[in-house]
Image (tube, grey):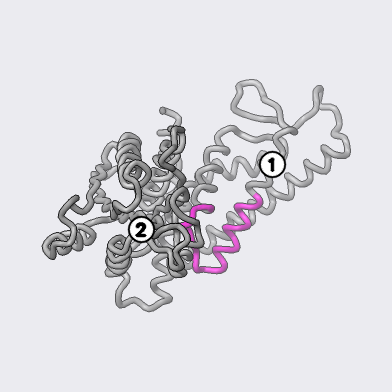
Amino acid sequence: MLDDTQKEIRTFFSWQSDSPSSTNSSAIRNALKEAAKSLEQKHPKLKIVLDEATRDTSGSPNIADKIWEKIDAAQIYIADITTVTPEGSPRPSANPNVLIELGYAISQIGWDRIILLFNEAQGKFPGDLPFDIVQNRVAKYSISLSEKDDSKKKNLKSLMETAIQAVLEKNPKTPEQLRGLSPERVQHERDVESLKWLLSQIHIPTVDDHIQGLPRYIRDKIFWFWESFKGVVTNSLFHLYDPILEQAVCKLYDSWSNTLSFYGRYHDAPGGATYVFANPGDAPLDAEQEADWNAIEHGAADMHQALQDILARVRAAYLEVNVNQTNAKAWDDYRAFQKD
């Protein structure tokens, strides 16, 4: 989890030279530098150190050993697994050296700290991927040799920033840290990480205020917390093993989304920070408005129940999760956003 302590994060990049540099290795490297710069600006005590194998010396046993050492020291591992075999090959494949390094990274730092990249302009996604990689998170982008649209390079930078931020927020344990634990304990530990990440997006007093004000009022700040919450729940790295929690989180997501789905029914209240569901002169609602009002009211009730179910489960089975701390972090992040 990102906090105010000084933190150095080493990120290792496994690149390949089979694909054009401008579309793959250099494009990814530049995106990484820009993403690191942006994250360091958002988190002044964060230092992201970018590392990779030394160019032009691959194949030396000493260099190979050095690569393993660098991966061992990394907190995040990034690999370009774009197809490098000719188009139409019966067995499309990524660069073999990258796949070897990926296998080592899986064993040392774990899937949850790995970011895989695939350039759709150079291969077919997901058809070209091995079956055991398809099931894991792959971030796809598309940059071709003839590409003149800088927006695609900016998209790659944004993709990298989001992926790195997600790993930092979740702060998953490595295989070594989980070694020796029962499968049930490993699942519990991972749920603790996911819960801390998720609940750090929710400022409970703001959510309570949102629920209590519905259907009449919506405060502007609830949208910021909704986008933060949605960003975690829809992230491929987010997963809950606990079926009770998973059901409650899905219910909170669906009901929260429902309460914000009736934009046309609200208008600005004086002051600009609140939206009101009302007719001019407070005239009675027509039949369609009444139906929407009832739908929002139902969503608010479901939202309240889902939030209470989550908190009850956390307090009963996940004592490692301090809701007061995650709540404070959510509010601090919102205030920092407001200052920006």
Q: Does residue 248 show up magenta in the picture? A: yes
Identify residue for label 2: 114
Q: Nearer the viewer, mark 2 or mark 1?
A: 2
Q: Secondary structure at mark 1?
A: loop
Give residue 319's quadrant in the image.
Answer: bottom left
Q: Nearer the viewer, residue 235 or 55?
A: 55
Image-based side of 192 in relation to 278, left or right: left
Three-letter amino acid code of the residue under disc 2: Ile
Residue at 23% across / 46% down in the picture?
Answer: 49
In the image: residue 67, left or right of residue 139: left
Identify the residue at horizontal 43%, vertical 76% (top origin).
184
Q: Nearer the viewer, residue 311 or 262?
A: 262
Between 113 and 61, the one lying in front of the other is 61
**Start and end of the magenta stretch?**
234-255
Which is nearer the N-term, disc 2 or disc 1? 2
Q: Circle 2: is it few (<14), some (14-19), or many (20+) Cα within 10 Å?
A: many
Residue under the image location 57 percent in, 58 percent down: 249
Q: Which mark is residue 261?
A: 1
> Residue 161, percent across and down?
39, 43
Q: Quadrant of the C terminus?
A: top left
Tell me the kind of residue under disc 1. Answer: Ser
Verify whether residue 231 appears in magenta.
no
